Every structure is written in structure tokens, then in C-alpha cells.
Image (cartoon, rainbow, N blue to C red):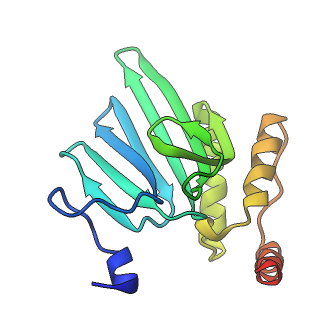
């Protein structure tokens, strides 16, 4: 297998290890105790560790949203959503639990009301036909800053998205 087919192949336990330049995100799912999931993003491969844990691998520059939730017998103890950009091997990055080596944090919120608000914003972006993984990193930083200040973020529109795509094309 070569090219895109190899990049999108699923990696099982017995398969060769993925390249070191990929960002690894370990997901755990223990019903009603610990639940980690990817809200959006495009992994290039996946490795199942056991029935409750798996690792997804993201190429440098890709953007993804990681949701982490945990509870105990008294209720929710953690609600967090991070939107990250995978970094190239050896690049400076911020550390995030379950993400190796780390990533460029574009947005970080904690507490269910803020997590829910960001999930609604992601839904609104998808509703206008834009993949949230393709949204301008500056928009996610804007959302983070506005929510941190207790303000309402500006909506991401098709016009803003076109401007971002044109700017990215010029910078390339």
C-alpha cells in the first residue's frame, strides 16, 4: 500500500507502528465514568489497545477537537473541550493529557456550560456546510478569548471562511 491508501489505513495491534511524526491521542471510554472522544478532525490511522482504549493519529497541521468527561458517584468531576492543532515532530507545543507529544492549543474550555456552548458553535459551523477541522485557527482563538471574557463570540460565516481560504492560498 502506498500514498493516500496507506495514510488512511487502520492500524491494528499486530500492524507496524505508525510514523513518529504523528500526534497521538489516546481515547478512553468507560461508560458513565471516563469518556474521551474526538468531536471533529481527520485521523490518518487508529490503533485499538483494548475494548475501552484506542489511539488516533493526526498528521502535523491538522486540527481536531478533543472532549474529555469524567464522573464519580457524586456526579461530573471533569468536562473539558480542547481544540488543538497537531505539531510537527520536535516543534514546541503545549502538553495536554492523553495527547502525545502535545499540540498547539487553539481553544480550551472547562465546565459543562462552556463545553456545551462550544459544541453548539461547532454544530452551527457544520450547519452552514463547513468542516470544523477546516476553520481558521484564528477563529478558534477568538472563540476561546471571547468565552474567557464572558462575551459572545462572532459567528463563523461562509464569507469569513472564504477569506481564510484565500489568505491560506496566498501564504502557501
- Residue 106 drawn above or below residue 7: above
Q: Which residue is outermost to the left?
A: 14
Residue at figure coordinates x 57%, y 64% from the top left? 62
Residue 143: x and y in percent read 76, 49
Residue 137: x and y in percent read 73, 60
Residue at figure coordinates x 78%, y 71% from the top left? 157
Residue 104: x and y in percent read 65, 49
Q: Quadrant of residue 111?
A: top right
Q: Quadrant of residue 12?
A: bottom left
Residue at figure coordinates x 77%, y 83% from the top left? 169
- Residue 152 drawn above or below residue 134: above
For this view, does 124 lie left or right of residue 11?
right
Q: Which residue is outermost to the front?
A: 90
Q: Nearer the viewer, residue 133 or 73?
A: 133
Image quarter in which the N terminus is found: bottom left
- Residue 119 drawn above or below residue 5: above
Q: Nearer the viewer, residue 99 or 140?
A: 99
Image quarter in which the C terminus is found: bottom right
Count of number-bearing discs: 0
For this view, does 114 lie left or right of residue 163?
left
For this view, does 23 lie left or right of residue 34?
right
For this view, does 117 lie left or right of residue 12?
right
- Residue 126 drawn above or below residue 99: below
Q: Which residue is outermost to the top?
A: 74
Residue at figure coordinates x 84%, y 35% from the top left? 149
Residue 155: x and y in percent read 79, 61
Amino acid at each position: 500500500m502506498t500514498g493516500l491508501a496507506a495514510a488512511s489505513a487502520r492500524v491494528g495491534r499486530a500492524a507496524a507502528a505508525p510514523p513518529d511524526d504523528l500526534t497521538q491521542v489516546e481515547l478512553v471510554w468507560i461508560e458513565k465514568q471516563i469518556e474521551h472522544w474526538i468531536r471533529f478532525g481527520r485521523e490518518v490511522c487508529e490503533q485499538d489497545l483494548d475494548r475501552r482504549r484506542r489511539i488516533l493519529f493526526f498528521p502535523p497541521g491538522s486540527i481536531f477537537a478533543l472532549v474529555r468527561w469524567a464522573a464519580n458517584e457524586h456526579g461530573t468531576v471533569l468536562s473539558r473541550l480542547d481544540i488543538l492543532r497537531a505539531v510537527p515532530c520536535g516543534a514546541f507545543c503545549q502538553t495536554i493529557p492523553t495527547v502525545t507529544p502535545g499540540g498547539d492549543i487553539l481553544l480550551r474550555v472547562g465546565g459543562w456550560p462552556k463545553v456545551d456552548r462550544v459544541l453548539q458553535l461547532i454544530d452551527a459551523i457544520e450547519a452552514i456546510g463547513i468542516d470544523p477541522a477546516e476553520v481558521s485557527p484564528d477563529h478558534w482563538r477568538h472563540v476561546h478569548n471571547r468565552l474567557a471574557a464572558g462575551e459572545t463570540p462572532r459567528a463563523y460565516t461562509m464569507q469569513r471562511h472564504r477569506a481564510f481560504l484565500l489568505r491560506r492560498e496566498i501564504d502557501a
